[in-house]
Amino acid sequence: MTAIDTAAPGNSRARPSFYFRYMVEPYLYIAPALILIALVMLVPLVIGISYAFQAVNLLRPFETGWVGFENFQALWSDRKFWLALTNTFWWTIGSIFFQFFLGLGLALLLNTQFYGKRIVQALVFLPWAVPTFLSALTWAWLFNPTIGPLPHWLAALGILSEPFNILGDPNLAMWGPVTANVWFGIPFFAITLLAALQSIPGELYEAAEIDGATAWQTFTKITLPFLAPMIAITVMLRTIWIANFADLIFVMTGGGPANSTQILSTYIFTTAFRKLEFGYASAIAVALLALLLLYAVILLVLRKKLVKI
Amino acid sequence: MARIQLNNIAKSYGSVEVMRDINLTIEDGEFIVLVGPSGCGKSTLLRMIAGLEPISGGDFTVDGKRMNEVPPRDRDMAMVFQSYALYPHMDVARNMGFSLEIRKAPNEERTSKVALAAQTLGLTKLTERLPKQLSGGQRQRVAMGRAIVRDPSAFLFDEPLSNLDAALRVEMRLEIARLHQRLKATMIYVTHDQVEALTLADRIVVLNAGDIQQVGTPLELYDRPANKFVAQFIGSPTMNILEIEPGEGGIRLKNGAALSVGLPDGQKRASELGVRPEHLNIVAPDAAHLSGTAELVEHLGSDTNIHAHVPGIGQVLVREHGHFPLKTGEPVGIAVDLAKTHLFDPDGRRLAA
């Protein structure tokens, strides 16, 4: 045993300087996490965004290089982009509106006591488990009058003048994917809101009842404030998700007819992988990213103002 | 103001009957305490009065009007919950004024009533805080404030002090007593703590296993318990119960000692003798009814509890006032205050002496 450290503490063993201990050392500890995040998130993001400022077209492999804001200038005067943006807006609003309110209704129903509750709860989750591609196909077939019942039912109810495929009508086509998306998205809201509902202490309802509150007052003054944080976060997540969600539309209508169901994410997909204009597709994606960031900021500010729990 | 009557009230969950034939009349302005061990049904009874639990049978009337099916919001009763049940997203003022907000009372009325209640309870400086920013005692006050603001016909308390520490509990007990003196409202108070019951109540209702054991003033329960359960539940430390058999000129204890306790005429069914620790005294061996050894001596300052072992009888607890100089293991003689004994028949019922 010769390797015993005989140096007295504070003498020959170097003490890290104040500067090192407070300004450098902490960053060494978090460096692994930061490097990992940078590698898997920031680097691809920066590369992706950088494409927006380049001409990257696989059909013209020799005309690449930095082009500044040229892609964005083209975007500004692209009629199809504005159409897709409008469609994205209606697609997102329509889907989230019905998903949220039907999901909330379902959650409120599931929060009561009834026979077979567990089985029903499990069944509610089912649309979530079906692969999107499959549900898109199924819905496309349901809307097809030759094999699906929906057009006939709609006609029988007088909503359609005759049983035709609404996916082929530019004025109605958006309702097809929206319906499929609502069916697909209700479980998400139902399950998350149900979890939030179940976390509300039952005594608060009893106290409110004794204080004289009606069912509606209890809902608005107890239930909603408790759900608010969950509502804010789920609506935000789902909005971003839906705005980016191209699968259903791509399978059901492919963006048609006449671009009437073309949303930004399907437009990005077609631009990148059909026309092979990666630079331009990136520019559209950056525009969508900016819009969604703005939306998220607004919602987070609102949440901070409104939510007290 | 309310006179509350329970006539043959019953409660069952499915086919399981937990309460039957509960009869009780609560006079206007009376402070009634429902007391009993956990699971005795006292909270269930209170919740039935509040309307939070359906009543399975019988009549529940307030001022003569049957209220069985009236929803809680129309019963005009305020309730203080054990967990306080404050609304966590509302500040103290809004919590207290919630019932007025619900009734869409004008703003000035709301503010003035809340301010008055806050002042009474010493909460004026806290009205803008959220419940999570308050201590347990303060939350308890807010819960009481919420009840006061309503000015209800009856106050219901469901073990309101059991989440507080001992010192705060005494303080809040006083506060509740003061509140009752000032408001003179009907109050029904549930607790498992007999000290709370004895100090607060005009009348105490002792419940056990869904049955009313006895209804009476604190002193009636203490002096003349209707049965062995009440005798042992009320009073601290617990009453000593000694097995006996009738003997000449009185009764005979299990170790053969005779006591000249007057048996009620013709009744030879007395099987047990109850005597409270404070009605036993340590005396010289020649004046003693019982003799044994001190197994444990607890010095509480104000009192001394002597756990004595009496051969042939078992443990007997004696309570002496003040500091009593006695050491563990010393022989003791015990005298019984014969006028303050209680006789029970084999079913545990009190035999009137």
Image: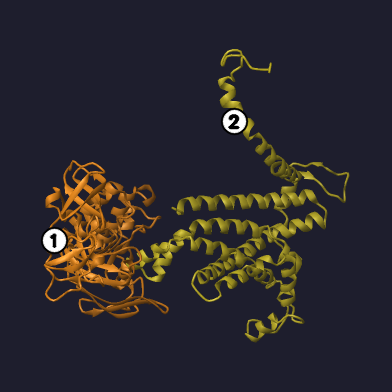
Chain colours: A yellow, B orange
**Chain letter belonging to callout 2:** A
Counting other residues with Cα less than 10 Å from the Cα at mark 1, is it few (<14), some (14-19), or many (20 or more)? some
Q: Nearer the viewer, residue A1 or B69?
A: A1
- Indicate the position of residue B159 as horizontal and vertical percent values: 31, 60
Q: Is residue A221 left or right of residue B309?
A: right
Identified at 22% across, 71% down, the residue is: B345
Question: Does B245 sit above or below residue A3?
Answer: below
Identified at 73% across, 44% down, the residue is: A44
Counting other residues with Cα less than 10 Å from the Cα at mark 2, is it few (<14), some (14-19), or many (20 or more)? few
Mark 1 sits on what residue?
B340
Q: Between tags 1 and 2, which lies in front?
A: 1
Question: Does B250 sit above or below residue B139?
Answer: below
Q: Amino acid at mark 2?
A: Pro
Can residue B115 be seen here? The reply is no
- Indicate the position of residue B65 as horizontal and vertical percent values: 23, 79
Identified at 70% across, 82% down, the residue is: A149
